[in-house]
Image (tube, rainbow, N blue to C red):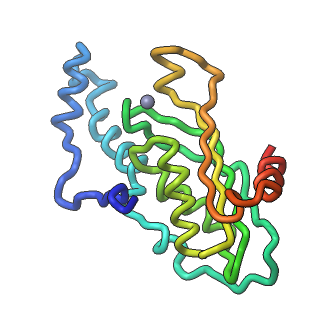
C-alpha cells in the first residue's frame, strides 16, 4: 500500500521541449500563434492535476480531530472528484461518497473533500483511489469502519475505444463494521442513493 504514495521529484520537472515534441508529432506547428504558449499552459495544468503527490492526508487534516459524542454514521456524499487515469493519461471524474462510524474521534467535515483531493490529483485507477481514501481515514481516525464509493466517468472510455458516453464506473472500498455488518452497509448504500 505505502508504495503507492508517490512523492513529486523536486528537481525534475516537465519541460516545454517535450510538450512541443508531442505537438510536433501530432502533425502541428508548435510555433503557430494558438500553440505557441501551449507547452507553458499544459505544464501548469499538469502540475495542478497531479498536485496530490505534494500532499499527504495527515498534513491536510492538520489535527482537526474532535472527541466523538456518539457512534452514529457520518456521511459526506456527492463530493466532486477529478483525477487522471494512469493507463491513458486522460481525465476521469465524478462523485465520491465517504462514510465512517466514529469510535473515539470525529474529523472536521471539510477535511474529507480535501483528503479526496490528495488522492485524486494523481495518476490513478479508481479502485486504488477509493482504497487510499479509505485507508487514510482508517489510519487517522481509527473508527469502527470506513466506506468509500466512487462513481466515475472515464474519458478514456467515453472519447475513444468503446465510446460509451453514459457509462459510469462504480468502485467501493470498505472496512470494519461496513464489511462485518450487513445492516450498516445497507444503511450506507441506501443513504447515498
Ligand atoms: Zn484509461
**Residue 84 % position (x, y):** 44, 40
Whether residue 16 sits left or right of residue 6 in the image: it is left
Residue at 47% across / 48% down in the picture? 128
Q: Looking at this view, is 127 or 91 the one in front?
A: 127
Q: Looking at this view, is 30 or 80 the one in front?
A: 80
**Residue 110 % position (x, y):** 65, 67
Relative to 181, is 31 above or below? above
Q: Looking at this view, is 20 or 119 the one in front?
A: 119
- When asked about the image quadrant of residue 17, the answer is top left
Relative to 170, is 49 above or below? below
Whether residue 178 sits left or right of residue 48 in the image: it is right
- When asked about the image quadrant of residue 34, the answer is top left
Residue farthest toward the bottom in the current orientation of the protein: 67
**Residue 108 % position (x, y):** 67, 74
Relative to 120, is 104 above or below? below
**Residue 45 % position (x, y):** 39, 43
Residue at 71% across / 74% down in the picture? 102
Amino acid at each position: 500500500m505505502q508504495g503507492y504514495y508517490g512523492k513529486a521529484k523536486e528537481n525534475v520537472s516537465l519541460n516545454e521541449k517535450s510538450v512541443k515534441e508531442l505537438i510536433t508529432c501530432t502533425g502541428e506547428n508548435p510555433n503557430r500563434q494558438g500553440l505557441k504558449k501551449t507547452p507553458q499552459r499544459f505544464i501548469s495544468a499538469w502540475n495542478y492535476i497531479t498536485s496530490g503527490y505534494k500532499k499527504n492526508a495527515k498534513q491536510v487534516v492538520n489535527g482537526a480531530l474532535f472527541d466523538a459524542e456518539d457512534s452514529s454514521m457520518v456521511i459526506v456524499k456527492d463530493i466532486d472528484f477529478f483525477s487522471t487515469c494512469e493507463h491513458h493519461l486522460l481525465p476521469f471524474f465524478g462523485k465520491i461518497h465517504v462514510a465512517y462510524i466514529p469510535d473515539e474521534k470525529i474529523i472536521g467535515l471539510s477535511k474529507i473533500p480535501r483528503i479526496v483531493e490528495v488522492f485524486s490529483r494523481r495518476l490513478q485507477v479508481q479502485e486504488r483511489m477509493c482504497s487510499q481514501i479509505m485507508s487514510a481515514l482508517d489510519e487517522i481516525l481509527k473508527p469502527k469502519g470506513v466506506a468509500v464509493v466512487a462513481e466515475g466517468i472515464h474519458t478514456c472510455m467515453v472519447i475513444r475505444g468503446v465510446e460509451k458516453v453514459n457509462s459510469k464506473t462504480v468502485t467501493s472500498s470498505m472496512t470494519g463494521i461496513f464489511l462485518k455488518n450487513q445492516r450498516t452497509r445497507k444503511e450506507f448504500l441506501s443513504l447515498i442513493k
